[in-house]
Amino acid sequence: MARHIVKSFYDENKLVNVESVADKDMSDIITQCLEKVGYSVERKKTENKSKTKSLEQGGEASAGINWLKAKLFSKRAISSAEGETVESEFFVSSPTDSKIIEVCEKNEIILLLDELHRATDSFLEDLVKFIKAYGNSNCDRFKIILLGTSSDPSKLVQKDPGIDRLIEDLHLKSMDDKERRELVSFGMSDLAIDISDPALRKLVSVCVGSPNILQYLCLESSEVAFEREPRKLEISDVDDAIEEYVKKRESRLYRTYMKAIENQGSKRYRKQILRAMSEIEDEYVTMEQIREKVESYLDVEVRAQDLSGALRKLKETVYGPVLRDIDKNDGSGIIQNYTTFIDPALKAFIRMQVLREEIS
């Protein structure tokens, strides 16, 4: 979804979309940027009177990118026509970080790095250095967009306080009903699909404001409707897409959730806590916020001590863990009375699961 939003503001040919930085290093990102622009450097040009011909050779070389060491593949092309011969390489043998930024600036690259919360510590170290070099280059057309959790900017700044001035932190809230309805209506209209009112209402409600869930459900249900004549999307198509999402696409989250709420008690505090955590917009949630929510669900008085045992269990291996405490930036301990999801994707998934249970 973020990719589609960026494409609405910038040229798609300028976008380098890294869907997840998990298990990646900066050499992967640099290579992807250079491949996007087909970067080549003119190495040699000579006058000649030969007939047109071309020759292409491939190879691998070790390249040092200042603080980054990586194996980079190069491709050399030699083309000639009457009058001149031009020899070029896919990229220079030892590019520096400033040279890479210069190339990205010249080509107006938009670099989108997603799932920053899954990045390795070594990746974050190199990313900080790249951002600092980026700031020193005073770029105007090269943009870097980082997507993750609200703790990620602090992790980066902690590694180098000097980049604090370069990072603008934007908190994205769930989409409201109007945004969801417009997104679905416009998308189906572009595909010439007639969507029934019940199907539209269910798509708008069951996505629980999550762009990721809404995108998946729309793609799955519209694919079926697109093959019909006439193209009509019904509520049964949405139901099938929901089932596909829960049981196949996000089966891991489904298993995690079911394991965490397994309980024979009447009040099922662990389930109530997870529902409260998912429905509170804040990423870091206090016990008082959880207590107020659970009290509204059960319509009885609930004390903090009633929930403390269940909350603690949700942070233990036997039930997940699915929740965790918040570490202080300096590593000196935890921030008291705050809890967050280990996997941010669970927040929207649980909201969706609760809604499915209510309407089933």
Image (spheres, rainbow, N blue to C red):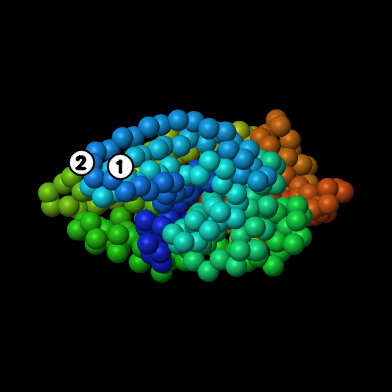
Give x and y (percent) for residue 52: 22, 42
285 to 72, vertically: above or below: below
Q: Is residue 196 left or right of residue 319?
A: left
- Identify which residue is drawn at 61% across, 63% down: 137
Q: Which residue is mark 1?
A: 79
- Identify which residue is drawn at 56% across, 54% down: 99
| Closer mark to the observer between disc 1 and disc 2 | 2
How far apart are the alpha carbons under marks 1 and 2? Answer: 10 Å
User: Pointer 1 and pointer 2: residues touching (CB < 8 Å)?
Assistant: no
Q: Which residue is mark 2?
A: 51
Foreground: 257 or 291? 257
295 to 312, vertically: above or below: below
Q: Extreme left residue here?
A: 229
- Going by the numbered disc 1, the residue's amino acid type is Ser
Mark 1 or mark 2: name the one nearer the start of the chain.
Answer: 2
Q: Secondary structure at mark 1?
A: strand
- Identify which residue is drawn at 78% across, 49% down: 327
Q: Secondary structure at mark 2?
A: loop
Image quarter (top left, top right, bottom left or bottom right) of the N terminus: bottom left
Give x and y (percent) for residue 191: 23, 56
